Image: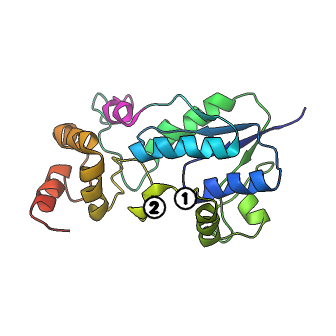
Amino acid sequence: MVNKTVLCWSGGKDSTATGILAKINNIKIDEIVTVMPDPFSDELTFKERFSRFMGLPINVLDSPTFEDYFNRVKTKGKHIGSIYGWPFTVYKTCARIMKWEPMQKHFKGQNVVFFLGIATGENRKILEPNRSLLIEHGLTEQDAFSLCKQHGLLNPLYDRFSRLGCVRCPKQKISALKIIKEIEPKKYKWMLENDDRSPVKFKPNKTFREIDEALRRGER
């Protein structure tokens, strides 16, 4: 049986550059998939631009939203009955629930080759038959950045943030949260309104409300 080829697209430079390499080298991609549990508004516009370049629709998989994860009730362990709240910054439970599990569910029982956005020099494993076009073409993360820029397909969020991720991710730097307050005011307000409900602090030593108060004082 012929394997289905799938581009796993996050909107970042590496997965976007992977799509560009496939397009310019006539490498067949049957489907482009992404998971967007908590996207920036700019990402939704960029998704449509990348889709037009690729000539393929981008399938946004059905997955729990950030709010779904935050309000999820624990059914195991010593904290049964409490909600998850803010994700722990040292664990990847949120990525598993909101991204990996929906991906596994969508492709269950299918023969798939995933094109992964892993660059040369990254310490990440690729299990066959999956492929990295960046590694096959010898491109580093900086090369991927340059390739996206060359084709006018660099995610506009790179103009504002040093790292991409969910809007309400606790891994966001304080300086990034200041920008989020400006460009995603509704989600920022949600963070303030729900901070007290979380059994977990937003940062290991600070609540989100404390961070907001520091931002109001002009601290970084």
Is 19 drawn above or below residue 137 in the view shown? above
66 within the magenta span = yes
Q: Splitting the image into 4 quarters, where does residue 107 fall?
A: top right
Q: Which residue is mark 1?
A: 154
Q: What crowding class fits label 1: few (fewer than 14 Cα within 10 Å), some (14-19), or many (20 or more)? A: many
Question: Which residue is drawn at the image coordinates 80% and 34% (left, top)?
Answer: 111
Is 13 drawn above or below residue 23 in the view shown? below
Real-space CA distance between mark 1 and mark 2, rounded to the nearest whole angstrom:
7 Å
Q: Position of residue 208 (x, y in %)?
A: 20, 51
Q: Which residue is mark 2?
A: 158
Q: Position of residue 109 (x, y in %)?
A: 75, 27
Q: Splitting the image into 4 quarters, where does residue 28 fall?
A: top right
Q: Is residue 76 left or right of residue 17?
A: left
Colour style of the rendered protein structure: rainbow
In the image, which residues are magenta? 65-76
Q: Is residue 10 left or right of residue 31?
A: left
For the C terminus, the quadrant is: bottom left
Question: Which residue is drawn at the image coordinates 73% and 45% (left, top)?
Answer: 114
From this viewpoint, is residue 92 visible?
A: yes
For the N terminus, the quadrant is: top right
Q: What crowding class fits label 2: few (fewer than 14 Cα within 10 Å), some (14-19), or many (20 or more)? A: few
- Tell me the kind of residue under disc 1: Leu
As helix, strand or loop, the secondary structure at mark 1 comes to loop
User: Mark 2 and mark 1 in contact (Cβ < 8 Å)?
Assistant: yes
Question: Which residue is drawn at the image coordinates 36% and 47% (left, top)?
Answer: 167
- Tell me the kind of residue under disc 2: Tyr
